[in-house]
Amino acid sequence: DVKVTQSSRYLVKRTGEKVFLECVQDMDHENMFWYRQDPGLGLRLIYFSYDVKMKEKGDIPEGYSVSREKKERFSLILESASTNQTSMYLCASSLDVQGRASQYFGPGTRLLVL
Amino acid sequence: SQQGEEDPQALSIQEGENATMNCSYKTSINNLQWYRQNSGRGLVHLILIRSNEREKHSGRLRVTLDTSKKSSSLLITASRAADTASYFCATAGGYNKLIFGAGTRLAVHP
């Protein structure tokens, strides 16, 4: 059974802190994605990666960076957390980066920035 | 933007009834996908329909695609309380990534 795991289900951080969200997949997928989900806005793509050490900006990359040192692991970094980054963060992986295949999602991390 | 937009935003039905959700989009697509999200959880892929397909079935799910109207519908037959969730359509076209709509919240009452 395919699996995408995220390091935390809930996280509370203070404004200005550096925050790391980790995602691991066991499907040997080359493509991984980070989304944030806010009420009424659906999922918005922050960053994606199509190979180890490769990354591309999504629709809302400002205030975020990513790291992909190993194929199975994709990290999202909030360099200096702000209250407007309070959100649900979802990681996904896929066989395809252009949406021609389904995406497999982790359970999400609900981040609260105080 | 080719973002899918779901309609209605919320739907409340009784167990055993059918639930229909619609998705409209703006530009040409390669495929359209439907996902389910249980409260506070990640999304689960339900079904993918390609642009050259008109209808697809999976268990109690039936998806139709009308590319001339740029719309899709998801029908859940004989709904159960466990179907209570949010349902999202996502479109993929050209070199674009998957773009998700804001979702339909379905509540199925016992």
Image (spheres, coloured by chain):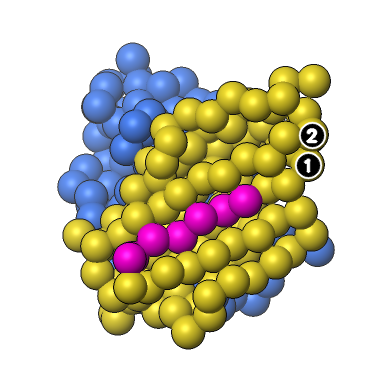
Q: How crowded is mark 1: few (under 14 residues within 10 Å), some or many (20 or more)?
A: some
Sooner in the amino-acid sequence: mark 1 or mark 2: 2
Q: How many marks?
A: 2
Q: Quadrant of residue A2?
A: bottom right
Q: Position of residue B96 (x, y in %)?
A: 29, 72
The chain whose colour is yellow is B
The quadrant the N terminus of chain B occupies is: bottom left
Q: Residue at x 27, y 47 (%)?
A: A64
* Residue A84 seen in render: yes
Q: What element carries label 2?
A: loop
Q: Where is residue B2 in the image (x, y as percent from the top left)?
A: 26, 62
Q: Is residue A24 above or below residue A42?
A: below
Q: In the image, is residue B74 part of the stretch drawn in magenta? A: yes
Mark 1 touching mark 2, by CB under 8 A? yes
In the image shown, does B59 or B89 lie closer to the viewer? Answer: B59
| Label 1 sits on residue | B78
Q: Position of residue B99 (x, y in %)?
A: 35, 59
Question: What are the residue bounds of the magenta stretch?
Answer: B69-75
Q: What residue type is labelled 1?
A: Ala
Q: Where is residue A19 in the image (x, y as percent from the top left)?
A: 39, 37
Q: Is residue A11 left or right of residue A61?
A: right
In the image shown, does A54 or B54 lie closer to the viewer? Answer: B54
Chain letter of disc 2? B
Q: Which residue is drawn at 44% across and 79% down?
A: B51
